[in-house]
Image (spheres, grey):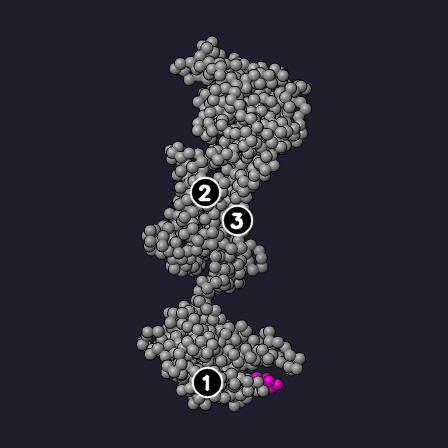
Amino acid sequence: MTTQAHPRASAQRDRKAVRTRPASGADYRRTFARRARRSDLMVMALWASGAAAAALFLASGGATQFSSLAESITSVGILAGLIGTDSILVMLVLAARIPVIDRTIGHDRAIAVHRSLGKPALYLLLGHGALLLVGYGMAVGINPIAEIGPMLSLPDMPLAFIGLGLMIAVVVSSLVAVRRRFSYEGWHLIHLLSYVSVAFALPHQLSVGGVLADGSLQRVYWIALYVIALGSIVTFRFAEPLVSSLRHRMRVAAVTEIAPGVTTIQLAGNDLRTLGASGGQFFIWRFWTPRTWWHSHPISLSAMPTASSARITVRNLGAGSAQLTTIPVGTRVSIEGPYGLFSDAARTSPKLTIIAAGIGVTPVRALLEQSSFAPGEATILLRASAVDETYHWDEIRAIATAKGATCYSMVGHRPHGVDSWMTAADYERGVTLQSAFPDLADSDVFLCGPTAWLDLIEADVHASGIRPHQIHAERFDW
Amino acid sequence: MRTRAILGSILASTSVLIVGYQAGVSVTMSDGTSLSLPVDAATNGTTGSTSGGTSTSTDGSGTETGSTGSSTPSTGTSTEGPAASGPTDGTYTGSSVSTRFGNVQVAVTIAAGSITDVTALQLTDDDGRSIQISNRAAPILRSEVLSSQSARVSNVSGATYTTDAYLTSLQSALDQAGV
Amino acid sequence: MRRAFSTMGTMASIALPDAWASEITELQRIFRAIDERYSLYLPDSELSMIASGRTLLADASATLLASYARALEWRSATGGNFSPHRPDGTIDLNGIVKAEAIEQAGEYLTAVGCPQWSVNVGGDILVSPTGGATPATASAAPLVPRVMRAGIAEPLSPTELLCSLKLRHPRRAIATSGSAQRGDHIWRAGSTGPVSFIQVSVVANDIVTADVLATTIVAGGEEVLDEVTDRWDVDVITVDRSGALRTTPGLLRALSPTA
């Protein structure tokens, strides 16, 4: 058992007992197998929910409603509406930051799936509207445009039209090309309209939706879906962070510049060990000063919290983060989290390889502090372009020494004209991943750093042939 | 692991779809057992037009949309394969199906293996719109009131009587008889 | 027992249990009071005073204004097919006050606890709620509640019955309106063509509704018939100029001679 020079976090929310020895390879494989099973079940649930939406239609006798062209078009329109709305509800669940989803696939992957569902969901909903206008119009012998009038006279339909309009605005504003024009907060404000859109669409589904008729099982199931989706949002995105912030009462204790453009913010609060953060996880921070209260920042802890203090390190990357460097001491802080799979909980293999560059050392510093490994099982590589980017390296080296991990450093610029993550000097010497990390195949590889550099090293690691689930990359750009 | 997710998703989705499809095509017999009604070619037109009739009458008004979906299962218009051995003759009551405007329930009479009559048992009963479907005054034959003409009555209703007209009226006769 | 007497320009026929025979006096008083207030044939009735301009409508009694307001509500509800206004603008509440009188008589009889009764004024009939919630009084001899059966007169020969039907609670009011006997109080909204129906009988839960809607359907014809059955919870039987009949399903069921 290794002795620790740094205080460890006590039992975390998702651990059953404090580990007294590093887990064996078998333990990690088991944990990983369980996580993989959960992840597969979630994927199955996602697809099955879409099938269930279609099954609602079939259970109402939908299979027989394709007898004429008008009826077929109407039926496809109804199906599109059901599946499209189901997709939207799934998207809400993915964005709700539910702990079990974060523990299984990580919040960033959940958001990636959320994003990928956006356009298909919108197309389904637009198809729903268009096909029903065509189908109902055809049944009565009028063109789709003329059918808009009668359709608007149905109960709750005007609201539904408005809801669809809002959803179009939300999805369009999230297209990469359009999103760039907004500040994050501006875009996020528009995105919140999606809640309004979902709420506006519900009444017409329950009142004129034949599939969801009063008293039917279909209606019960549908309402349950809404309860789950909206309930998750309210619980995990609003209620839980609020309770957590009120409980821990964090305030800014000290703001120190430790390198050009890099600041650590020391925070004071109550019961910070019960935050349940694993080393490498991040929180979403909100600092309550008049200029900064509406910005939220995802920032990793750069050290494991003690009972009454925590630390984050931020780099001056733009207007938002620049303001953080001038926050007065005593500012109240509210938090959402912890989130992220960049931690010991994601381990799948007995050995550990950590490669961090620049500001990427922050989660790595916390990860190292908490990670369990035997001496000789962990290798760390720290990368910086210049000496003034080597903040926290001293702490990392100290932890490495104490825990018996090997620590390399690479300081210098990239080779000219070559896409490499290494320094020019090491590149010329012929350093490769394999030469630096002989145990790469048996390791979990944790990577963190600026996006451009991260892309290069991640590609290199993939090319080395290790399995994708062994690679953990923390990106700061979502 | 990804293969497992893909296969599992296909399996789960297919099962869900099959369950939904089955739920939509079964018809409950009046004694509670489940039966899928085969419909032979001769009655296809009748049942087809029954459900088709419901669709067009509501679509015709241009306002009741999407409410017909749930009423078809009771009439069993889905064909479930050849009518090898049809149901026994008799009247079968479909399950009561909820629609936006209330409950719909129909009974089907089978004679000689084909559907001979479809009767509406419940044709909605909430709010004014649904009464529209069920309470219209329809033509009847004189013969249908014949039997009631000879029943004993205690009052007679007619368009306003003047006193003279009353004297020759039936009511007067009733009053004299002290009924 | 049954008593018949003339009132409001027509005949009333009231059936009461023998023990309640004395209540006839009160009923006659109710009808007389209404007649004296609303009859346009009495020059000194309140309505005549208003019609001739001797009294302003604004100065009318609360009772008359209430009846007038009720008639106006029905005018709106029926889109003008029922109207308390004659073409020359005179307020003629004849179409509603007869029914109101029957209604009041029924309320009185129910209030004093009479278990079984029927009130027939000019062919509009209201019966007690059979098997219903009339307050039982200790002195009342227990009567076997029986479903009252009413006949409808054949429009062109009123000594014969067109049909008969059960008046089973809640459908305990029936009113018949027709042009066979020249009901002058039917003022049709803007139409001078021949009527579609020569007789319409409406069976409803209350007598005012039955009476107003019967008048409405005669005035408005076939399209109004459908509208009325769509919007109100009533049963209808109509006779058209050729003698053909139309009934609502509920009325068809009520025809059955078996109880």
**Compared with residue A254, is residue C241 higher up or lower down, i.e. above or below?**
below
Please tell me in which quadrant of the rendered image residue C87 appears.
Answer: bottom left
Segment tinted magenta in the rendering: C16-20
**Residue on which disc 1 sits:** C36
**Which amino acid is tagged 2?**
Ser
**Residue on which disc 3 sits:** A223
Please tell me in which quadrant of the rendered image residue C236 appears.
Answer: bottom left
Q: Which mark is residue A194?
A: 2
The residue nearer to you, when weighing C259 against B163, is B163
Image label count: 3
Tag nearer the camera, 3 or 1? 1
Residue C103 lies, in percent from the top left, at 51, 78
* Residue at point 45%, 42% (across, down): A194
SS category of the residue bearing label 1: helix
**Compared with residue A319, is residue C35 higher up or lower down, i.e. above or below?**
below
- Residue ranking furthest to the top: A429
SS category of the residue bearing label 3: helix
For the residues labelled 3 and 2, the Cα–Cα distance comes to 18 Å
Tell me the crowding category of disc 1: few under 14, some 14 to 19, or many 20 or more residues within 10 angstroms, Cα based. some
SS category of the residue bearing label 2: helix
**Which amino acid is tagged 1?**
Glu
The residue nearer to you, when weighing C53 against A426, is C53
The residue nearer to you, when weighing A356 against B66, is A356
